[in-house]
Amino acid sequence: QIGTHVDANPHSGRIDTLNLDNASLQPIWSAAEQLGAAIFVHPWDMVGKERMPKYWLPWLVGMPAETSLAICSMIFGGVFDRFPKLRVAFAHGGGAFPFTIGRIEHAFHVRPDLVSIENKTNPRKYLARLDHRAVIPARFYVDSLVHDASALRMLLNLFGAGRVALGS
């Protein structure tokens, strides 16, 4: 299990977080791919938590945003393309990512100068799709812990049943 971001200097007394596309993490992705190991990404230490002191908002809003940030970083940073056999699963149904894929894809098309600077592949191509009548599986996995039947159906549609794992 790995967090949605990594503390670059855990013993320094300050937090220097790295997104999951950071080049210093490539040896981890490479080793996991070579070993056939699966990595589970779970959010913690949510960005903006200082603005969410009430209502359990870090868990309700922060965690889904952190997970989406992790997925977008790995997609736009080209991690899945550099390590095509890497198996990564994201907690909580992929957080906000599945529900904002339209916005993410739109940004890819209208702001390539900001979005596709390291990866020219449409982010939707990392989801399950039909290609010449063959089903291409999603490039990563999500768990089913979304607490809503409609959301689960959407995950099954976007990722395919073989890429949605039981979450608890």
Image: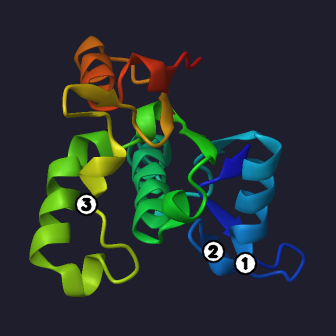
Above or below residue 146? Residue 16 is below
Q: On the picture, is 23 further left or further right than 50?
A: right
Query: Can you tell which mark lies on residue 122?
Result: 3
Residue shown at the point (40%, 61%) measured from the top left = 72
Q: Is residue 7 visible?
A: no
Give the residue at mark 1.
24
Residue shown at the point (22%, 59%) measured from the top left = 104
Task: Give the x, y percent position of residue 47.
Answer: 49, 65
Q: Circle 1 — which element?
A: helix
Q: Are marks 1 and 2 in contact (CB under 8 Å)?
A: yes
Task: Give the x, y percent position of residue 7.
Answer: 73, 71
Task: Give the x, y percent position of residue 85.
Answer: 62, 47
Q: Residues within 10 Å of mark 2 (few under 14, many from 20)?
A: some
Relative to the observer, which residue lies in front, 28 or 6?
28
Residue shown at the point (40%, 24%) measured from the top left = 146
Above or below residue 9? Residue 55 is above
Give the residue at mark 2.
18
Marks 2 and 3, how far apart in space?
23 Å
Q: Amino acid at mark 1?
A: Ser
Relative to the observer, which residue lies in front, 7 or 56?
7
Residue shown at the point (47%, 50%) measured from the top left = 67
Q: Circle 2 — which element?
A: strand
Relative to the observer, which residue lies in front, 41 or 52?
41
